[in-house]
Image (cartoon, helix red, strand yellow):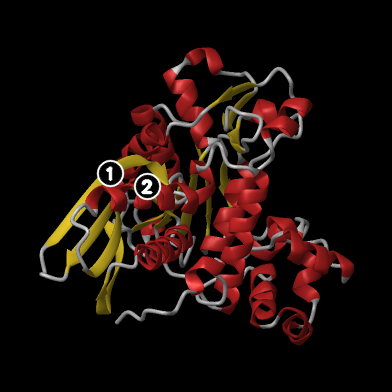
Amino acid sequence: MFDRAILHMDLDSFFVSVECLKNSDFKSKPLIIGGTSNRGVVSSCSYEARRFGVHSAMPIKMALRLCPQAIVLRGDMDSYSKYSKLVTEVIADTAPIYEKASIDEFYLDLSGMDKHFGCFKWSKELKHTIIHETGLPISFGLSVNKLVSKIGTGEGKPDGMKEIKNGTEKEFLSPLSVRKIPGIGKETYKKLSFMGVRQIKTLSEVPPRLLEREFGKTGRRLWEKANAIDNTPIVPYSEQKSMSKERTFTEDTLDLKYIRNLLLKMVDQLTFDLRSSQKLASCITIKIRYADFNTYTKQKHISYTANETVLSRKACELFDILNERRQLIRLIGVKFSGLVQGNYQISIFDDTPTAIQLMQQKDWIRNRFGSDKIMWAAYLDKKKKDK
């Protein structure tokens, strides 16, 4: 019996599964979702393609060298969001408390359910209900916390059901690679490997002070994860509808170069916020207030994205259309709306690996040192100040 019961559910190869629902000819075939040009990257791929070594964020050219018979499709975020909403509705109708972690991933708190029904039995029934109602395959892991349940789901995929019984969490984690721990990327794994730490069991035995010396505050968290310690609560799901920024100038201005740079800086900051909160936007709105206090807005619906390049281009297009009066401007603003859960990589089908790496490195620097520590040089124009 679980004192605390946390269920993690993850849709199997979600984008691919949706495409197979739309076209049954794709079933059991190597399928790649991503850019349709040679400059594109893999956003998702079927298990049949993964057997050839294909994985997400890989350049399409490399993926096709590994698996030349693969079918490449440009993704359809509108369809993926629609099916994600269907799954969310099924879970919301039955789950006592749930958290939507991304477009295809959920956490549910089933604590106390063992006394009345049985957590594992209830989880199996929910899995079958989701499959019946949506046609999408889904896997789950059940344990005492979010960390162990998430790893359990990964070990059970595809179409898996994994229960890690109370008291066996460390036993379950011990033989696994430290790569299985969420949050351990290439650089952290490389450093741990250099220390001779490749298995979770080994990491659990490293003194926390040594890990803190090597990794800072993250080191303590690594030790806790390796020892199956995770008290992170379930955050009840609520949909954020929009996010925005605006600036009022201390002096009304007609300096269009400065205004555009400020607009692009706000877009840059908002796209970072989107990616940090694992959200995608489907609508962008530009706002202008002139010196006479007349205010105008212009919006455009777009495919779901958190791509700075795409949103910056749309922002400039809307600004040029909206700014017809050639009058002194008092305020400029930008808003992203129509938000859904999703990782930013899934919407940049035609981007290059270099552009993705640049975006990831910018985000890494901001997360570690602060959001104002890196920006494009064009944004450094300080000749006009805003409130």
In the rendered view, would you say 245 is above or below 7?
Answer: below
Q: Where is residue 277 in the image (x, y as percent from the top left)?
A: 43, 61
Q: Determine whether, in the image, residue 339 is placed left or right of residue 369.
A: left
Of the numbered discs in the image, which one, if any, rests on residue 46? none
At label 2, the amino acid type is Lys
Q: Determine whether, in the image, residue 204 is placed left or right of residue 328.
A: right
Q: Does residue 68 appear anywhere in the picture? A: yes
In the rendered view, would you say 203 is above or below 150?
Answer: below
In the rendered view, would you say 10 is above or below 240?
Answer: above
Residue sitting nearer the eye, 194 or 283: 283
At label 1, the amino acid type is Lys
Question: Which residue is situated farthest in the top direction here?
Answer: 25
Whether pointer 1 and pointer 2 mark residues with C-beta atoms closer than 8 Å, the reply is: yes
**How many residues crowd mark 2 within 10 Å: few (<14), some (14–19), many (20+)?**
many
Q: Position of residue 49 (x, y in %)?
A: 68, 28
Q: Residue at x 37, y 47 (%)?
A: 314
Of the numbered discs in the image, which one, if any, rests on residue 314? 2
Query: Which quadrant of the figure has residue 349?
Result: top right
Element carrying mark 2 = helix
Query: Which quadrant of the figure has residue 39?
Result: top right
The residue that disc 1 covers is: 300
Q: Does residue 284 appear anywhere in the picture? A: no
Q: Which residue is drawn at 56% across and 64% down?
A: 363
